[in-house]
Amino acid sequence: LNHNRYDISVTATDSELKLTIKFLPYIGVVYRYIYLGEGKYHGWSYVGETVNEKDRKRNWKKDDDKYANHELTEAKRTLDKNKWKYRQLDIVDDFYNLNDVKSKLFELEEYYIKRYNTREKGFNKSSAGTGNKDNSPSEETRRKIGENPMVEFIRRKPKRKSLNPTLADIIQT
């Protein structure tokens, strides 16, 4: 038995032994972290989804949160950590299929990103989350990339020849 999906309990009396197995559903949440501090980012937020809320909340407290994009990571490092508030927006459950839960979470995440405009006035950098279809950068991000002089330098930088040639390199020579 997968103990993450079942609640097993045993009770005993003088005359009987009772084993109870309770089937547990897959559960996922769509959540929002809102920055309530002062300044430019007051009211900005981040919308996300997870099937492991406890783990996601624990990762949120870390500066190197593996689920956060660069802008969100920087905001978490520089803004007052005590001014972020967590809100559950939606809960999805299904007894049989984790993929159905994830699919519904992706739809809801996209809905809430649009509803709260967290792509333009928040820390979401795609309109549907990174686990979803559209992972393109926002207009502001594209503008900043275009203005960065290092981008042109990197584009023009000549490629070095590898010390470990591929089979294609060997055949061409």
Image (cartoon, helix red, strand yellow):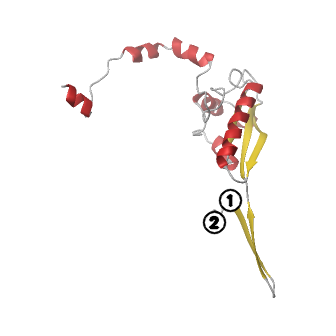
Reply above or below: 21 against 116: below
In contact (CB < 8 Å): disc 2 and disc 1? yes
Identify the secondary structure beneath mark 1. Answer: loop
Residue 121 appears in view: yes
Q: Does the image show residue 55?
A: no
Where's residue 124, x and y in %?
66, 28
Image location of residue 52, percent across then percent down:
67, 48
Report the number of numbered marks.
Answer: 2
Q: Where's the N terminus, which quadrant? A: bottom right
Extreme residue toward the left, this view: 173
The answer to which of 127 and 64 lies nearer the viewer is: 127
* Residue type indicated by callout 2: Leu
- Mark 2–mark 1 distance (CA, rounded to whole Å): 8 Å
* Amino acid, disc 1: Arg
Q: Quadrant of residue 45?
A: top right
**Which quadrant would residue 32 be assigned to in this image?**
top right
Instruction: Check residue 1 in the rendering and tell me which mark sits there, or answer none.
Output: 2
Q: Name the residue at 70% across, 63% down.
A: 6
Where is residue 65 drawn, in percent x and y? 59, 40
Q: Which residue is mark 1?
A: 5
